[in-house]
Image: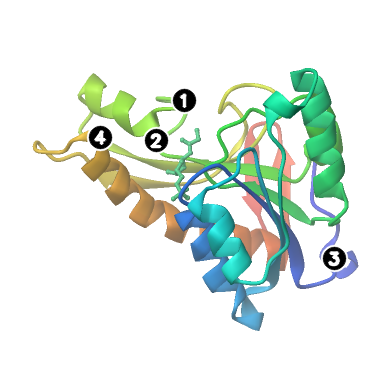
Amino acid sequence: MSAPPIEETALPARLAVLVSGAGTNLQALLDACADPAYGATVAVVGADRDGIEALVRAERAGVPTFSLRVSDFPDRAAWDQAFADEVAKYEPTLVVSAGFMKLAGAAFLDRFGDRYINTHPALLPSFPGMHGARDALDYGVKVTGCTVFIVDAGVDTGPIIGQAVVDVRDDDDESSLHERIKDVERQLLVDVVGRMARDGWQVSGRKVHLR
Ligand code: GAR
């Protein structure tokens, strides 16, 4: 699997950013995209719920948004299909899960699986799932961090693009640790997305090479 050849990829790259919460990673991308040299623009922000700060951030930046709730569809597959259709309207170069608390289904992966990345608050393959920071803290590890990876059909199992390390402190609770992780996570995500947008990427098996 590889990105389109650079010469065929029009810059700025179009990002679809998927969110479920505070949206500080989204904000970091919006801020980075304000510089034309970054090479990307946020084309749409999609959410699985209403009333979240991330959507306010997108609206403040003048970025189109949509929100589709699973409970408004007959089943998960119908929601997944509708979500994929909505994202596709914006013709994204890259789809970025940034605190999006839903697993993509078959329809979404069929459409975007070659260009769908996620960020996770732990050093995968350790501590996948919904509570990466809490699970690392409970386990007693001395270092943890964050991982940006290409999404596949598993739970946080896809090929790893980039990672950054954070020390765990004796007095950390879940909140303090997660906030320190998010400080480095935002930088990592901005760096990885910018490099993918500007230069492209290649995947061989589990190895991802940024060009
Ligand atoms: C981030 O730490 C992200 O890695 C995590 O949610 C946070 C969102 O923060 N995602 C997951 O745990 C997904 N399994 P934000 O809304 O402030 O960007």
- Image height of 70 relative to 10, above or below: above
Which residue is at the front of the view, 84 or 47? 47
- Which of the two discs, 1 and 4, labels the residue nearer the N terminus? 1
Q: Which residue in the protein does label 4 denote?
A: 174
The residue most toward the left is: 171
State the separation of the CA atoms marked 1 and 3: 32 Å
For residue 122, the mark is 2
State the separation of the CA atoms marked 2 and 4: 12 Å
Residue in the picture at 40% in, 35% down: 123
Do the numbered discs 2 and 4 sit on residues whose CB atoms are within 8 Å? no
For residue 9, the mark is 3
Q: Amino acid at mark 2?
A: Ala
Horizontal side of residue 21 vs 11, given as left or right: left
Colour approach in the figure = rainbow
Q: Quadrant of residue 35?
A: bottom right
State the separation of the CA atoms marked 3 and 2: 32 Å
Which residue is at the front of the view, 119 or 143? 119
Residue in the picture at 48% in, 24% down: 129
Q: Amino acid at mark 1?
A: Pro
x%, y% of residue 205?
70, 31
Q: Which residue in the protein does label 1 denote?
A: 128
- Which of the two discs, 2 and 4, labels the residue nearer the N terminus? 2
- Which of the two discs, 1 and 2, labels the residue nearer the N terminus? 2
For mark 1, does the 10 Å Cα neighbourhood hold few (<14), some (14 to 19), or many (20 or more) residues? some
- Image height of 107 relative to 54, above or below: above
**Which image quadrant: the C terminus?**
bottom right
Regarding residue 92, the answer to whether it shows in the image is yes
Do the numbered discs 3 and 2 sit on residues whose CB atoms are within 8 Å? no
